[in-house]
Amino acid sequence: MKITKKTFVAIALLGISVTLGSFGNDASAQGNRGRRQGPPPEAYTACEGKSAGDTAEFESPQGDTVTGTCEEDRDGKLVLRPDNPPEGDRGGRGQRNSDD
């Protein structure tokens, strides 16, 4: 079987594309590894039967007591926003100016 120069170049480019694509997916997967997206279910359960502004608490999977205030999330559900969020987690709230 004779492989033409065009076929060889096409196969090489395909191989490079697949290789680069897998690096991109691997890097993004590693970036999110071990990080939860959004509040844990316990943060919602802690605010059941409460109103926005009420204080609540729950026990984390690590055994720590998490205290905070019930606030509405983007979907209008009450969720506990911790008083002391984990380092690197701003609890979905950014810095705001007093003019906002």
Image: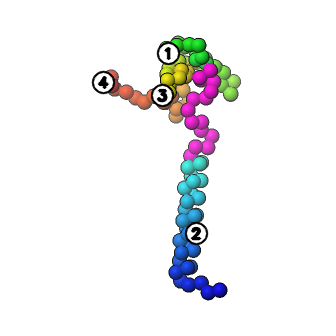
- Name the amino acid type tagged 3: Arg
- Residue 39 in percent (x, y) is at 57, 29
| Mark nearer the N terminus (4 vs 2) | 2
| Mark nearer the N terminus (3 vs 1) | 1
Query: Magenta residues?
Result: 31-45
The answer to if 41 sits in the magenta stretch is yes
User: What residue do we see at 57% from left, 64% from top?
Assistant: 18
Q: Taking 50 as reference, is 30 above or below it?
A: below
Residue bearing mark 3: 74
| Mark nearer the N terminus (2 vs 1) | 2
Residues under numbered marks 2 and 3 in contact, where contact means CB atoms less than 8 Å apart:
no
Residue 15 is labelled as: 2
Residues under numbered marks 2 and 1 in contact, where contact means CB atoms less than 8 Å apart:
no
89 relative position to 57: left or right: left
Label 3: few (<14), some or many (≥20) within 10 Å? few
| Mark nearer the N terminus (2 vs 3) | 2
- Name the amino acid type tagged 4: Asp
When asked about the image quadrant of residue 46, the answer is top right
- Residue 23 in percent (x, y) is at 57, 58
Residue bearing mark 4: 99
Residue 81 can be seen, yes or no:
no
Residues under numbered marks 4 and 1 in contact, where contact means CB atoms less than 8 Å apart:
no
Residue bearing mark 1: 52
- Name the amino acid type tagged 1: Ala
Mark 2 falls on what kind of element? Answer: helix
- Residue 90 in percent (x, y) is at 49, 30
